[in-house]
Image (cartoon, rainbow, N blue to C red):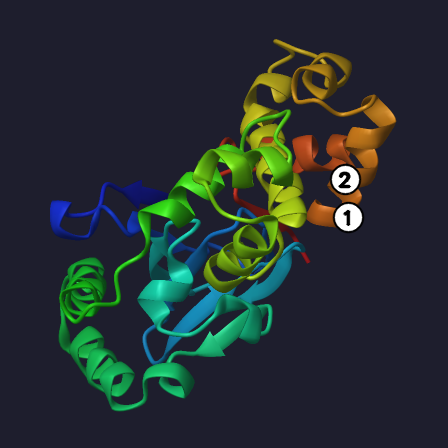
Amino acid sequence: MYREFVPARAVAAAVACTWHGSAGWSRNLRILPDGCADLVWEDTELTLVTTGGEPVRWLLPAAGRSTGLRLRCGGAGSVLGVPMSELPTGRIPLTTLWGDTARRAEEMLASSTSQRRVLEMLIAERLAAGFEPERSAYAAVRGLGVTAASVENVADDLGISERGLRRRVRDEVGCGPKQLHRVLRFNRFVRRIPALAAGRTSLAAVAADLGYADQSHLGRECRRLGGSSPAAMIRSWSRQDGVSERFQTRRP
């Protein structure tokens, strides 16, 4: 089971959603890259999960239950207070970044009946303390999300140099603008998986619509960014009966 929730208005500028999930059976979870970062609570520890430009593997026990908060693409570095380019891909205990603040949050999470609200309160405190994302960083992400986007054009639209754009994107997302453009295009493909699984469109049509050179180009990008072929990703989604496209699972 996996469900997403609209964040509270106080944190909506920095938070894409909160979520809750339970494993149901022992499985290897594959978190697909989308430029976002998640704070994840698993009963004992609060972790930061980043994907960069590759899928992250996460082994879930059958009784595993998780609650999370997803920071918007383009603002994670500011909210966390550290450039994303300095953080490794994967799971990081939040205590290594926030120390006592994270430990107090873990104590509150352990005793609360609404972990999602505790996570929102944590981010609200960060925003109130001045750890607020720059609007220009979100504008850069929107620009790079366009199919025909180029680093030069996005920088011109924002009135900054290409070097300034690269620094801003790396600080907030953890990769350069070109890599983020690839990740965002791949994420748009991932959102097409339900239609592909239902037979309402074809891989060739989706590849052309998203600006890939051809279907083979789409296939190569899926293997690099998602860890498997488009056909395998579609089969995985179908086995889950539509559970979040961002989280793909493989039975052991």
* Residue drawn where x is 34% and y is 59% of the image: 68
Q: Residue furthest bottom?
A: 100
How far across and how far down the image is residue 6, in percent? 23, 41
The residue closer to the viewer here, 169 or 94, is: 169
**Could you give the CA–CA distance between mark 1 and mark 2, rounded to whole angstroms?**
5 Å
Circle 2 crowding by C-alpha within 10 Å: few under 14, some 14–19, many from 20: many
Q: Is residue 201 above or below residue 49?
A: above
Q: Is residue 11 above or below residue 66?
A: above
Q: Residue furthest right?
A: 216
Position of 14 with respect to 181 (left or right) is: left
Residue 41 visible in the shown view: no
Question: Is the Cβ of the residue at disc 1 closer than 8 Å to that at disc 2?
Answer: yes
Query: Label 1 sits on what residue type?
Result: Arg
Secondary structure beneath dot 2 equals helix
* Residue drawn where x is 68% and y is 18% of the image: 206
Circle 1 crowding by C-alpha within 10 Å: few under 14, some 14–19, many from 20: some
Query: Label 2 sits on what residue type?
Result: Glu
The residue closer to the viewer here, 57 or 95, is: 95
Q: Circle 1 sits on which residue?
A: 224
Q: Quadrant of residue 63?
A: bottom left
Quadrant, the C terminus: bottom right
Q: Quadrant of residue 147?
A: top right
How far across and how far down the image is residue 237, in percent? 59, 34
* Residue drawn where x is 55% and y is 27% of the image: 146
Position of 177 with respect to 158 (left or right) is: right
Q: Is residue 79 above or below residue 154?
A: below
Residue 203 visible in the shown view: yes
Q: Circle 2 sits on which residue?
A: 221
* Residue drawn where x is 19% and y is 52% of the image: 11
